[in-house]
Structures are given as C-alpha cells and as structure tokens.
Image: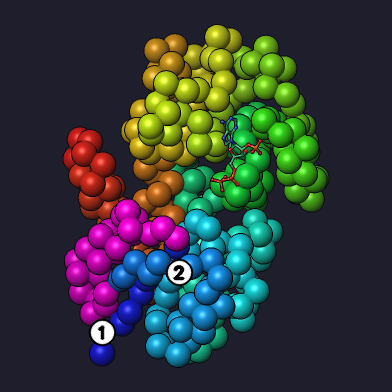
Amino acid sequence: MEKVFGILGHPVGHSMSPIIHNDAFEKIGIEARYHAFDVDPDQVKEAIEGIRALKITGCNVTVPHKIAVMKYLDEIDSEAEQIGAVNTIVNQNGKLVGYNTDGRGYVKSLLDETSIDLANMKVLVIGAGGGARGIITALLRQGIGHLTITNRTISKAELLIDLAATFDTPAEALEKQVVEEKLNEFDVIINTTSVGMSPNVDESPLSLDRLKEETIVSDLIYNPLETKLLKEAKAKGAQTLNGIGMFVNQAALSFEHWTGQKPDEIQMRKIVLQQLGGPSC
Ligand code: ATR
C-alpha cells in the first residue's frame, strides 16, 4: 500500500517540501505520497492523533508547530530535546518519535560547502530565536572554539549562552555595536534572523565594515538567494553561503529517518532552485 507522509504547518501552501520529497520517493522507487497539511494552532493534538489513526509513516513539522507537537509525541530524540523543537516525526509502528534535523542540516551544509575545520573556530551567530537555537545546538555538538551571540533582545542571547556552558564551550552574548567593532575576530558569521528576507531585501542585520576576507559569511535566508549581507560579504572577498544547503540537508536527513535511504541531494537542490526561479545548478 502507498505510504503517506506530510508536513504540518500553518500556513503551509508555499512549502517546497512536498515537491522535493515526492520527487525523491519516485526516483528511489518508494511507493509513497507526501502532502502539505495546514493545521490550525488549536488542532495540533488532533493532527498528531491523526498521524496515529491514519498510520501516516512520517511527517515534517514547520512554523508555528515545532514546539507545540512535542508534548503529544511518545519519544523525543536527545538533540531535538536540547533544541526544544521537533521538525521531523517518525511513526515506528505506532510509536511517534520526534527529531530535529534543522541544525545538523545547517552544519552539514557548512562543512560540505566550505573546507572549514570548525574545532577551533570563532563563530558569531546573529539572532536568538528558534532557528538560532537549532544551529547553536548542532554547532556545539559538532565542536567549535568559541561562540558569540548577538541579538536585538540581548536577554534572549544570554539564555542561549547557558546552552554553550553545558558543552564547556566558551561563549558570550554581545550587543551588535560591540560585535561590529571586533568583526575581524570571527571566522564564521551566521545570520539566523529574518532581516534581509524578501520583501525587505535592502536590510542587513550587521555592518560588515570590519569584515576580514577569510571569514565565512552565512545566511539562513534563501529568498532572495543572495541577501544584502551576503552581497556585501562577497564584495569584500569573503566566502558566502545561503540557506539552500540547510533547507536541502534538513529535508534529506528527514528522508533518511523515514526510509533509511539517502535521497539525491543535488537533485533536491536543483528542484528548490527551479522553484525559486534561480539558476538550476
Ligand atoms: P526563528 O524560529 O525563525 O528563529 P523567531 O524565534 O521568531 O524565529 O526568532 C527571530 C529572530 O530574528 C530573533 O532573534 C529576533 O530578534 P528578537 O529576539 O529581538 O525578537 C530576530 N529579528 C527578527 N526581526 C528582527 C529585526 N527587524 N531586527 C533585528 N532582529 C530581528
């Protein structure tokens, strides 16, 4: 019988997940269909019960349900627990297990697209929301030299510093102006905020006046493919990374959790770029 997969979100109509997963199922030869399910915030519990009742094999979870689904699942993987959010549900014969592939997806894209050895690197994360938490957790699990977090609301950055302490990684929360003044000290800069996302393409979360050429500058945004932050970084000779790699890798890791098989990530990337109207390679 055809297996059923899906994404739970609200709104979810513009999600690119159905198209990339359905293509991967077809290419690998798995009889399955992946749907977008628009779940109202007051019906998350019923949606999870629906997964059980309908024997849906696996789901992705997106905004705004990544935290809300957790209390209805049977088991939460340790990384998802640490992040405090779930983006992948696996139905193991009726037992629903929650995972989070966002952070690992990001770190994989960083390692794949650059030749960086993160072990001694000084990393600056801009933002302290859900996206930042996933990435910071994955970076700390991978192992980095030093973590700095800057955020409009500095108290939220300070909360994330406590997470670094559990990994014995030196970390600090700094105001934006302080970070801008010592920007040349960082090896990797990661924007996790929505600043610069379409339609606000003329905004940038940070001044790059003091950026050094060797720094890798990365933005989780993929619409536009090149944000103002990345354009400015590129103009200064720095290597840049947009959010496509993270999106594709989190999807590929979810696919592996459900099927035990690796999808073709290059093909996934191609589809995403086509959907976004960019170049197809
Ligand atoms: P996500 O799950 O995508 O990370 P979020 O939890 O709402 O979304 O977090 C959004 C992040 O972007 C936060 O760090 C937020 O800063 P605050 O904590 O001060 O709210 C940041 N952010 C959003 N809009 C911003 C803006 N216009 N300027 C600066 N930071 C902004």
For label 2, the residue is: 39
Query: Where residue 249 sits: x, y (%)?
Result: 41, 52
Q: Which residue is mark 1?
A: 2
Query: For mark 2, does the 10 Å Cα neighbourhood hold few (<14), some (14 to 19), or many (20 or more) residues?
Result: some
Report whether the residue tagged 2 is closer than 8 Å to ligand 1: no
Tag on residue 224? none
Nearest to the eye among marks 1 and 2: give it.
2
Quadrant for the C terminus in the image? top left
Residue type at mark 1 is Glu
Instruction: Work out which quarter of the rendered image holds the N terminus and state it.
Output: bottom left
- Marks 1/2 in contact by CB < 8 Å: the verdict is no
Q: Magenta segment range?
A: 10-33
Q: CA distance from mark 1 to mark 2?
A: 23 Å
Along the line of sight, which residue is nearer the eye, 193 or 165?
A: 193
- Displayed quadrant of residue 86: bottom right
* 250 shown above or below 235: below
Neighbourhood count class around disc 1 (C-alpha, 10 Å): few under 14, some 14–19, many 20 upward: few
Residue drawn at (47%, 39%), measured in percent from left and top? Answer: 220
